[in-house]
């Protein structure tokens, strides 16, 4: 099944506590966070979760896939209550996923956020949008900024790491450049850029209704 970027965004903005309560799960409040009785090492806040015992966390879609055993499209449907459409008939056949893995996430995105806003002068509302969808995040080992590219089902297929100190750049092993970092809008216009940061800088200059159009970073292709 096929979901639009807007549907995926709505799923990733879902309140996880409300979702769990709708599933009949029991939670306890601890300050501004919640704990799930079934997994006592898990903390939840809004649309974010973190599993301390395994040092990983993420957004609602990741949560449903992790704890409810759902596929990506099943998770979107469960969170939004919306059915996906049939994939377009001219959709290219995706390459195998076996060699591709996203780098582990850091406990927060603080260093990557600071790099993009302070060093690269990207506006916080622009970076915040992509951090909220999981299309940008901070990896754990070296605190690089990771730019994620997804296929038409929203499944990660590509990732580019950009160092937050120095000039380090690297595509993650197994990345499929047919699915580079991008945003898919419903409009007819496509804006193409060399690098993800070029794309973000453009959005800072032309913010008005930017989500209607589509944007693609070639990543050195």
Image (spheres, grey):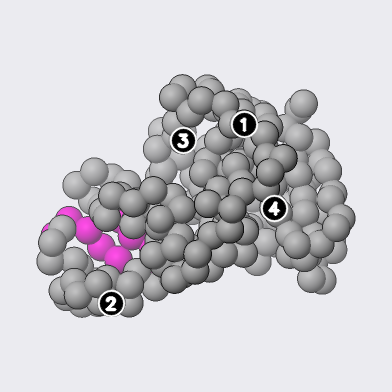
Disc 3 is placed on an element classified as: loop
Which numbered mark, 3 or 2, is in the foreground of this view?
Answer: 2
**Is residue 139 toward the left or the right of residue 204 in the image?**
left
Cα separation between marks 1 and 4: 20 Å
Sequence-first disc among 2 and 4? 2
How many residues crowd mark 4 within 10 Å: few (<14), some (14–19), many (20+)?
A: many
Who comes first in sequence, dot 3 or dot 4? 3
Marks 2/4: CA–CA distance:
31 Å
The answer to which quarter of the image holds residue 43 is: bottom left
Q: Which residue is mark 1?
A: 93
Element at badge 1? loop
Q: Which residue is mark 3?
A: 102
> Relative to 30, is 12 above or below?
above
> Which comes sooner in the sequence, label 3 or label 2?
2
Q: Residue 104: image x %, image y %?
A: 40, 38
> What residue lies at 39% left-to-right and 48% top-to-bottom?
71
CA–CA distance in space, label 1 to label 3: 21 Å
Residue located beneath label 2 in the image: 22
Mark 1 vs 4, N-terminal side? 1
Q: Earlier in the sequence, mark 1 or mark 2?
A: 2
For the point 61% across and 48% down, which residue is it? Answer: 87
Q: Circle 4 sits on which residue?
A: 183
| Residue ID at (80%, 36%) | 194
Magenta includes 20?
A: no
Residue 96 in the image, given as x and y percentages of width and height: 51, 25
Give, as a single range, the part of the protein colored magenta: 40-50
Q: Are marks 1 and 2 in contact (CB under 8 Å)?
A: no
Horizontal placement of 86 versus 24: left or right? right
The foreground one among 211 and 33 is 211
Circle 1 residues within 10 Å: few <14, some 14–19, many ≥20: few
Mark 1 in CB contact with mark 3 (< 8 angstroms): no
Q: Secondary structure at mark 4?
A: strand
């Amino acid at each position: 099944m096929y979901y639009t970027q807007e549907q995926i965004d709505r799923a990733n903005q879902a309140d996880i506590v409300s979702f769990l309560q709708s599933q009949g799960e029991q939670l306890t409040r601890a300050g501004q966070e919640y704990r799930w009785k079934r997994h006592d090492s898990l903390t939840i806040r809004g649309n974010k979760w973190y599993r301390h015992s395994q040092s990983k966390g993420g957004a609602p879609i990741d949560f449903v896939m992790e704890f409810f055993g759902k596929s990506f499209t099943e998770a979107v449907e469960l969170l939004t209550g919306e059915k996906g459409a049939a994939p377009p008939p001219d959709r290219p056949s995706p390459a195998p996923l076996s060699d591709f893995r996203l780098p582990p996430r850091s406990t927060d995105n603080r260093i990557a956020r600071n790099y993009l806003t302070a060093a690269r002068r990207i506006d916080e509302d622009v970076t915040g949008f992509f951090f909220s969808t999981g299309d940008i995040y901070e990896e754990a080992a070296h605190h690089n900024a990771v730019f994620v590219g997804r296929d038409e089902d929203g499944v990660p297929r590509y990732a580019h790491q950009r160092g937050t100190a120095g000039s380090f750049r690297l595509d993650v092993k197994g990345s499929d450049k047919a699915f580079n970092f991008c945003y898919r809008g419903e409009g007819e216009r496509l804006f193409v850029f060399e690098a993800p940061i070029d794309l973000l800088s453009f959005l800072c200059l032309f913010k008005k209704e930017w989500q209607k159009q589509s944007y693609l970073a070639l990543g050195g292709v």
